[in-house]
Amino acid sequence: MQRTVILDGATLTAQALSDVARHHARVELCPTSRNLVQATRAYIEEKWLNDTAPLMYAFNTGVGSLKNRRIGSEDISAFQRNLVLSHSASTGDLMPPDAVRAMMAIRANAFASNRSGVRVQIVDRLLAMLNHDIVPVIASKGSVGASGDLAPLAIMSAALMGMAESKVRFHGEIVSAPAAFERAGLPATMDVQAKDATALINGATASLAYAVLAAYDARAVLSDATISLGMTLEALRAELSCFDDRVMLARPHSGQRRIAAAIRAVMCGTERCREESRRVRLDSPAGGNGARDRAAFEPRIQDAYSLRCAPQVYGPALDALDYIDGILATEMNSATDNPLIFPDAAGAYQVISGGHFHGQYVAQAMDLLALVMTDLGAICDRRTARLIDPACNFGLPTNLIAERPGINTGFAVVQSMGTGLVLENVALCSPASVISLPAKGNTEDHVSNSCFAARRTRTIVENTQSIVAAELLVAAQAIDLSDAHLAAYALGRGASAAHRVIREKIPATLGDDRWVHDDIEAVRSMVVHGTLRRAVEAVCGPFFGAVDLPA
């Protein structure tokens, strides 16, 4: 049954926004919000659509450096239309459809808070576009994230208006906006009137759309990275005492303790991460040396940092996500255009200019998310590197080659792909929010750079999904190669579930090399679509629940 999301300006969540953006959940306006929006608009039309009304920015004045120019009431509609035309200045690659749909839903939700003064018809048009899957085609680059994401929002608004220049995605095609509306049985065009376009194009809403989806995906990939960690722990027969809750309570950060609890759940029941299993020597066709062979019999005591310090690296990422999600939840349920309209005690309304369109909250949150996701990817890649290295993998064959080393190369390049993505992330994650240049004749003398910050962070999260997929694929191969000697030692319940799901789609490479591109993409699809998470959480319970911390 299709989910319906009710927009009321106050309760939109990341899950609901993802459902709208990616799964085409139906969207409706809360009846109470509808009544309030209509009441505010009725006052505007009765009191302010005349030439004796006080000057109100971007309502009956120009914008930016033209803020002192009064717009006559007979010209307001033309002014609003011209705002859309003049602000449609974006370029570059196209915004992904899910980000565009998220942007439209966020904008409609902002209007539902009844601070913008738009006509309710504008909200209804946005919702009709979402419900009919009419998705504007929008170039992604050019916003400075200060007076909002003006250019992408202007192109969205042009599509809403049915401008002939506008293109949309509709039923798998890119067509003109008027044609899509006609095919959907909706009016082909729509005028904008006082405050409509001003409100539509104002606010860092493209930034926020990218940001919410990136943070939503980042929390999911943190779960998958916990699963990939568990599989590597199994493959290397690691020491698990470092994840003991007593250890976590000695330095009781919430995030690291919750991570350690999730690791223990994934590893529950493991017999491979015990001293008896470590005493088993793995014979491999890759050959070995005495030092490596002896290592299989030596007490482990403790492991390398990429294994032992996972809670201390993942924990800050989880705590950061909690902070970021709080920022984004507030942003999703805020009025972010300018000026805003407020009722007073006497039943009248006031217009107040402010700066909620500025995207600094989003930009700084995305800088933080970029940093923690880059580091998460880096530690996953270091574990993948250990798995293929006979100096570090406790008896597994070089590059995890099953047979005929030399003729076969194994998983070395799967691992180096991860390293390449880590390097890309490192280059991308330098702070964007501190880069500010004045724009628009120095009217916007401090900008947030939020749209780039959020677009860049989406790329980092996507790269990290692939890095985690590489670890999952390589760890599954390592587990299979050791099965001949360790079959009597059970995997933990979470790692076992993940291994089973992977092997249902991808066979182990037990002979010659395979076309690994498709294998990587198959595991990456499991990460993106939550296949592994659902299977593991079905046997382990949900990850990252709250913990009781000492007073």
Image: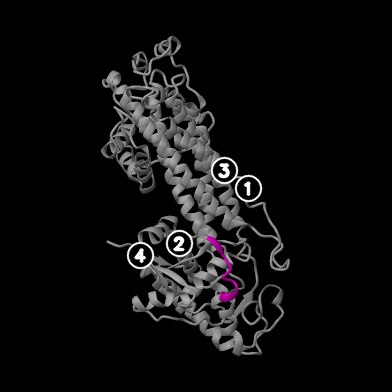
Q: CA distance from mark 4 to mark 1?
A: 37 Å
Q: Are marks 2 and 1 in contact (CB under 8 Å)?
A: no
- Type of amino acid at the residue the image marks with label 3: Leu
- Type of amino acid at the residue the image marks with label 4: Gly
Label 3: state its secondary structure: helix
Residue at (48% x, 63% y) in the render = 103
Q: Which mark is residue 371?
A: 3
- Type of amino acid at the residue the image marks with label 1: Pro
Q: Which mark is residue 102?
A: 2
- Type of amino acid at the residue the image marks with label 2: Ala
**Left of 116 or right of it: where is 490?**
left
Give the mark nearest the N terminus, 4 or 3. 4
Give the mark nearest the N terminus, 4 or 1. 4
Give the mark nearest the N terminus, 2 or 1. 2
Residue at (44% x, 23% y) in the render = 241
Specify start and end residues of the magenta stretch as a single range: 84-92
Residue behind mark 1? 431
Front residue of 442/198: it is: 442
Residue behind mark 4? 172
